[in-house]
Image: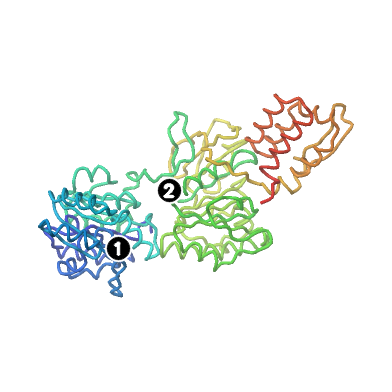
């Protein structure tokens, strides 16, 4: 389920001439029966609303006073999001015979043209208030209080995210909450300015329009409206004509596959950044500890500590908080069992509350390997919103691969990578071109269409995360190590990681150091084997501009230490 919550305005949307039809009430009951939640968001005061709408207890939350008050019909509890109106402000308006004048728990409301006196009072009394206009109504509220604020607080109370909400309205004061939700809908009688801002408009007006929307939600979860919701799409690159290449945030599954050094980490980092920028909650499972330095998400687990399931669930209960789960401390043979238990738990959370919005499986072949029985994993039908990363599709259990609709292939023989994926999916794939893609390019194919693969230039994250940091800094890079050989090849000093490189660079003789400096061997190693383009570029500048032995040693060592070996 994509949409778990319907938020609706009252006057002009749910109600016509202050009343809600029986037909609309029955539609609300149908939506509740589908397992979804209802939130009523209104500028009216609570007591006034209750008198007009006896069926108010159909709603799980009522956001009254234009966002200032949250009411829980099930427990009769009220929660104020702002302070009561200053008595001197109310007195000022009454002394000037402002009428009509309504004073709520937080809100003060009147009608045009009384806004001039209202603004005069705010200025003379020196109070911090905002004035909201809505179809002739003039509402005075504390700064920062509006329907968006009230709705977001109510949604949070229910355990959901604004990405799980459809909002429907008709007037100016509805636009803030509509812009903040995953899908915004205007009823046909809405102001033209509101229709322009919304994702789509119903054919019917008022309550009939709400009933139309509810029928659409129950029927297909608004899947037929996906093409209208491009404002939420996630960019992963640019096409040949320099247009953004986007993924729907509700894709089935995405498989990122390709050879080492092809740019998987860069594209993944950009994808994660874009998810975070749009406030989608993600859960990244990290078998090798490559993402432990990522800023933003909570880090759970380490090289010595097994992540605890209860702690993971507790973190993800907060829809605004994502997490990285490091499984380094779990033996390789035990990771599939851990993954299965974790996934089943989080899928229950997603079923009930709509989040985590995305799962990211790094080194997916460690978590759901090909060798395991397909029945062991028993992946749910129509498993969606996951991003799996591997070197080859055939290394992953087919139960996951069959849920993928989009493959992003990088590096050498990208079209063969797609061919391997197509064979697992039992889909015909014919592509005559051969691609050994340079880093930064990718071939994208959607298996559910007959379209040819699209060549894109991968997005680059704003802050490129240095993946494999621990391996490069302190591990053994094996055949990718740097060798100080000197001009005649008499030496064979192996720097098997960056720490060792810095140590050896300080002790190797001047002739050997300068030999590799002039050959640009340092920048080549950083680019080709450490996969750090920025470090390579900065080092190459030193190689070209600095001939002094001591200064060049110190400068390059400083670059490495700042990125990899500096203490935390």
Instruction: Tell which tag, 2 or 1, sits nearer the viewer.
Output: 1
Instruction: Identify the residue at image location x=45%, y=30%.
Output: 242
Single out the residue that lies furthest toward the right: 490
Quick one: label 2 or label 1, which is nearer the N terminus? 1
Quarter of the image containing the N terminus?
bottom left
Q: Which image quadrant for residue 301?
A: bottom right
Q: Secondary structure at mark 2?
A: loop
x and y, in percent, of residue 447 in the image: 47, 44
Q: Read off the residue under disc 1.
A: 83
Residue 67 to residue 112: above or below: below
Single out the residue that lies furthest toward the bottom: 75
Q: Read off the residue under disc 2.
A: 278
On residue 313, which mark appears?
none
Q: How far separated are the C-alphas under marks 2 and 1?
A: 31 Å
Q: Residues within 10 Å of mark 2 (few under 14, many from 20)?
A: few
User: Is residue 418 visible from the viewing direction of this image?
Assistant: no
């Amino acid at each position: 389920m994509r949409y778990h919550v319907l938020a609706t305005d009252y006057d002009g949307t749910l109600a016509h001439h202050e009343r809600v039809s029986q037909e609309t009430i029955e539609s609300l009951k149908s939506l509740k029966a589908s397992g979804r939640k209802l939130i009523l968001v209104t500028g009216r005061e609570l007591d006034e609303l209750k008198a007009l709408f006896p069926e108010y207890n159909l709603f799980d939350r009522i956001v009254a006073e234009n966002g200032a008050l949250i009411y829980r019909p099930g427990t009769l509890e009220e929660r104020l999001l702002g302070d009561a109106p200053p008595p001197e402000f109310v007195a000022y308006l009454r002394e000037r015979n402002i009428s009509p004048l309504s004073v709520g728990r937080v809100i003060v409301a009147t009608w045009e043209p009384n806004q001039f006196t209202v603004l005069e009072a705010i200025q003379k009394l020196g109070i911090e208030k905002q004035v909201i206009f809505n179809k002739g109504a003039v509402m005075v509220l504390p700064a920062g209080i509006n329907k968006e604020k009230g709705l977001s607080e109510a949604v949070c109370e229910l355990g959901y995210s604004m990405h799980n909400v459809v909002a429907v309205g008709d007037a100016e004061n509805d636009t803030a909450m509509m812009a903040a939700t995953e899908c915004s809908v205007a009823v046909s009688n809405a102001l033209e300015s509101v229709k322009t801002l919304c994702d789509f408009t119903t054919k019917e007006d008022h309550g009939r329009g709400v009933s139309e929307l509810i029928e659409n939600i129950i029927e297909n979860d608004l899947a037929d409206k996906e093409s209208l919701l491009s404002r939420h799409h996630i960019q992963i690159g640019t096409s040949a004509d320099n247009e953004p290449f986007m993924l729907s945030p509700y894709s089935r599954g995405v498989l990122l596959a390709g050879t080492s050094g092809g740019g998987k980490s860069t594209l993944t980092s950009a994808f994660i950044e874009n998810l975070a920028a749009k406030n989608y909650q993600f859960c990244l499972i990290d078998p090798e500890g490559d993402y432990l330095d990522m800023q933003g998400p909570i880090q759970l687990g380490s090289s010595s500590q097994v992540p605890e399931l209860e702690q993971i669930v507790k973190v993800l209960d907060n829809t605004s908080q994502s997490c990285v789960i490091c499984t380094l401390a779990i033996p390789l043979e035990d990771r599939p069992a851990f993954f299965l238990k974790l996934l089943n738990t989080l899928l229950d959370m997603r079923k009930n509350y709509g989040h985590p919005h995305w799962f990211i499986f790094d080194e997916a072949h460690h978590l759901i390997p090909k060798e395991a029985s397909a029945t062991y994993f028993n992946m749910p039908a129509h498993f969606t919103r996951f991003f799996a990363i591997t070197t080859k599709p055939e290394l992953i259990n087919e139960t996951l691969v069959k849920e993928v609709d989009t493959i992003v292939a990088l590096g050498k023989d990208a079209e063969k990578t797609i061919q391997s994926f197509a064979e697992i999916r039992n889909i015909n794939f014919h592509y005559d071109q051969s691609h050994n893609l340079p880093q930064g390019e990718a071939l994208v194919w959607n298996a559910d269409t007959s379209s040819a693969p699209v060549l894109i230039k991968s997005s680059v994250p704003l802050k490129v995360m240095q993946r494999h940091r621990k391996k490069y800094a302190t591990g053994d890079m094996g055949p990718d190590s740097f060798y100080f050989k000197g001009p005649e090849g008499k030496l064979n000093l192996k720097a098997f990681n960056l720490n060792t490189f810095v140590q050896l660079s300080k002790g190797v003789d001047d002739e050997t150091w300068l030999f590799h400096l002039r050959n640009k061997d340092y920048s080549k190693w950083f680019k080709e084997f450490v996969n750090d383009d920025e470090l390579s570029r900065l080092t190459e500048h030193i190689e070209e501009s600095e001939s002094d032995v001591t200064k060049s040693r110190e400068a390059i060592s400083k670059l490495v230490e700042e990125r990899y070996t500096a203490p935390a």
